[in-house]
Amino acid sequence: MCLYIAGDPALVAGVRRALRGVLRDWGVSELAEDMELIVSELVGNAVRHGSGLGVGVLLAAQDDLVLLEVSDGTAGQPAERQAKDEDEDGRGLLIVRALAKDCGWRTNDGGGTTVWATMPLPARRAAS
């Protein structure tokens, strides 16, 4: 799955639906709940903190992993912070780190940043 969306928070729900459909088609619907939360956090952050030029989303199966990449035009390392109990936001990257097998970020050659996360494919899918 490869999508490019405008920097509009209202479009995040459509990305979640598309991701759920792809995971269903791949036969790994059991990953949908965690992957939807991860994509919501990453796309939401890209929309909120990005350059406003749009957000790219890539979902791919590689070997025994599902790879999710979210790219925007903002340069620099995503900021992970410690939210206080009363804060209503600031936990997104912590949630991604808790759910994903691995995650990180990179600066893109043409500018901007890609934040990525992986999840293990279930054994029956990874073996096929």
Image (tube, helix red, strand yellow):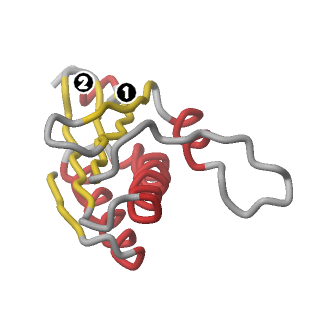
Tell me which numbered mark, 1 or 2, is placed earlier along the sequence.
1
Helix, strand or loop at disc 1?
Answer: strand
- In the rendered image, residue 124, in percent from the top left (x then y), is placed at 28, 27
How packed mark 2 is, by other alpha carbons closer than 10 Å (few <14, some 14-19, many 20 or more), is some
Q: Give me the C-alpha separation between circle 1 and circle 2.
A: 8 Å
Total marks in image: 2
Q: Write down the quadrant of residue 110 in the picture.
A: top left
- In the rendered image, residue 2, in percent from the top left (x then y), is placed at 15, 53
- In the rendered image, residue 31, in percent from the top left (x then y), is placed at 40, 43
User: Nearest the camera: 15 or 74?
Assistant: 74
Residue drawn at the location 59% of the way across and 43% of the way down: 95
How packed mark 1 is, by other alpha carbons closer than 10 Å (few <14, some 14-19, many 20 or more), is some
Q: Are marks 1 and 2 in contact (CB under 8 Å)?
A: yes
Determine the residue located farthest toward the right in the rendered image: 85
User: Nearest the camera: 127 or 103?
Assistant: 103
Residue hosting label 2: 126
Determine the residue located farthest toward the bottom in the rendered image: 10
Residue 32 position (above or below residue 110) = below
Residue drawn at the location 65% of the way across and 52% of the way down: 90
Residue hosting label 1: 120
Residue kind at label 1, given as amino acid type: Pro
Q: Is residue 57 left or right of 119 when viewed as pictured? A: left
